[in-house]
Image: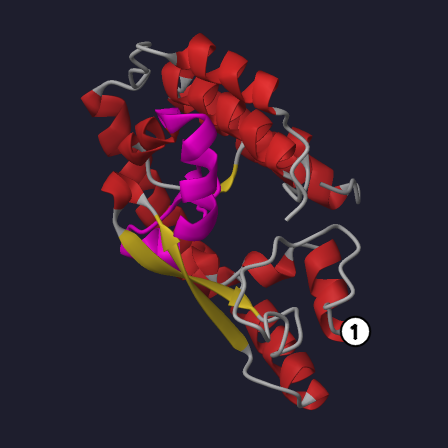
Amino acid sequence: MQTITSTKTSVMIKEIYADIAVTDGMCWAERIIKRTADLLLSLFGLVFLSPAFLIVYIMLKKQGDGPVIFRQERIGYRGEPFYILKFRTMRVDSEENGMPRLARKEDDRLTPVGRFLREHHLDELPQLYNVLKGDMSFVGPRPERKYFIDKIMQINPDYEYLYQMRPGLTSMATIYNGYTDTMEKMLIRLQMDLEYLQNRSLWLDLKIVFTTVNFIINGKKF
């Protein structure tokens, strides 16, 4: 993994976040409403988008080079592991040596169908089931693997504050920070996610969802 952040920058980040308590901007009532909306909308989405699920399933089966669904352990709410679900976009040997690799915008491991799915964000559709189960929310920090979380926390241990929230399908960091293919981008994403935690509200979630949908409809890459 490419690491751009220097030792000096790492020390500065630690000093900035040292002893700063990051509190949740949502009250308990908002959190209940958010979870209820997640439950209802994910159930509706699974039913309404079932034709899209079928089409993608057929495309991947026709490609015929591996399983349709990709499962990978991520760390989520309260620091508990869960398995995130996606339509498979990469070759089955994408991490052949067992070493985790970050996805890149133009990744040479993408299959032809996978590239199309990734560009249109269709690979994320199975995560509606993660939202329904309560592993994830529509809006929240993207869930990460423990391998990379450990590396992030060596520089900024405030990552632990994110465990107050369910990880999400989309976020401000997802929209505006792009692919987190370097440690520098991971640290920027973390700062944006911490800011979201402190300021989140149902209104902010709604704005993030509409911005995400607008970007997808208009073909804007993120």
Q: Nearer the viewer, residue 77 or 218?
A: 77
- Please give the name of the residue rendered at 44% of the width and 64% of the height, measured from the top-left corner: 72
Q: Give x and y (percent) for residue 187.
A: 55, 28
- Please give the name of the residue rendered at 24% of the width and 18% of the height, measured from the top-left corner: 27
Quarter of the rendering containing residue 30:
top left
Q: Give x and y (percent) for residue 21.
A: 29, 12
Q: Which residues are magenta?
A: 130-158
| Total marks placed | 1
- Please give the name of the residue rendered at 36% of the width and 12% of the height, measured from the top-left corner: 18
Q: Give x and y (percent) for residue 66.
A: 59, 85
Q: Nearer the viewer, residue 77 or 47?
A: 77
Q: Give x and y (percent) for residue 178.
A: 68, 38
Give the left or right position of residue 164, taking residue 203 as reference: left
Quarter of the image containing the C terminus? top right
Colour scheme employed for the rendering of this structure: secondary structure
Q: Which residue is mark 1?
A: 112
Q: In this rendering, does residue 145 appear at all?
A: no
- Residue 21 drawn above or below residue 117: above
SS of the residue at dot 1? Answer: helix
Residue 216 inside the magenta-drawn segment? no
- Residue 150 drawn above or below residue 108: above
- Please give the name of the residue rendered at 60% of the width and 68% of the height, measured from the top-left corner: 52
